[in-house]
Amino acid sequence: MRVVGENVEQGIYSVEDARAMAEDLGLDLVEISPSADPPVCRIIDYKKFLYEQKKKQKELKAKQQTVEMKEIRFGPNTDEHDLNFKLKHARKFLEEGHKVKAFVFFRGRTIVFKERGEILLLKFAQELEDVGIVESMPKLEGKRMIMFIVPKKKK
């Protein structure tokens, strides 16, 4: 087998010789590439290696950005002031990098005002044009008319 390591002379050794070398250095013999011809082993401190791997994983996870879905609910008869209030919240969510799910909930007989709900959502999207992009246009699903808005990419 081929043996590599930091303070080890690279070369082809028998399994017993490689184990003895690792033992002399107080390190571990780890098989890296078993399918290679000859198989490749490395003499390293395995616990330290695992610690470094865990540290890298943690670092990558910390850098990862999660996108959260924020919901904003309207009724078909939502007034101008309420719309402006919810617009302010939606703008803040989009600036923070969250997705916004805006929906109009039709209760009872208000389902006859589908056009009013669609107009409300389109007006909402138009107001948020500077900070967000409409991912899906308003569509009716059961008693809800749903629309998704995603934040614009920052340059």
Image (tube, helix red, strand yellow):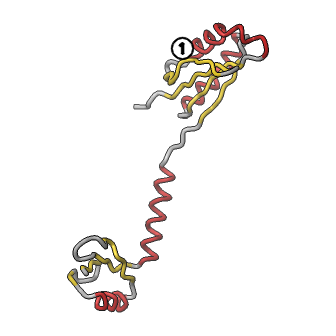
Give the quarter of the figure containing the C terminus.
Answer: top left
Locate residue 73, reporting x and y percent.
69, 23
Give the quarter of the figure containing the N terminus.
Answer: bottom left
Task: Tell me the SS state at disc 1.
Answer: helix
Residue 12 seen by the camera: yes
- Classify residue 8 by image quadrant: bottom left
Answer left or right for 89 relative to 10. Answer: right
Residue 131 seen by the camera: no
Question: Is residue 71 placed above or below 66 in the rendered structure?
Answer: above
Q: Residue at x 29, y 78 (%)?
A: 5
Label 1: how many Cα within 10 Å (few below 14, some 14–19, many 20+): few
Answer left or right for 75 relative to 9. Answer: right
Answer left or right for 14 relative to 146. Answer: left
Question: Is residue 1 placed above or below 120 in the rendered structure?
Answer: below
Locate residue 108, reporting x and y percent.
79, 15
Q: Which residue is mark 1?
A: 126
| Observer-nearest of 104 and 153 | 104
Of all residues, the one furthest to the right in this rendering is 108
Answer left or right for 18 relative to 100. Answer: left
Locate residue 31, reporting x and y percent.
34, 76
| Observer-nearest of 143 and 103 | 143
Q: Residue at x 66, y 8 (%)?
A: 116
Question: Is residue 125 placed above or below 96 in the rendered structure?
Answer: above
Locate residue 137, reporting x and y percent.
53, 18
Question: Is residue 99 placed above or below 118 in the rendered structure?
Answer: below
Q: Residue at x 47, y 59 (%)?
A: 57
Instruction: Give the amino acid type for the residue marked by disc 1 in the picture.
Output: Gln
| Observer-nearest of 121 and 36 | 36
Q: Residue at x 58, y 24 (%)?
A: 91
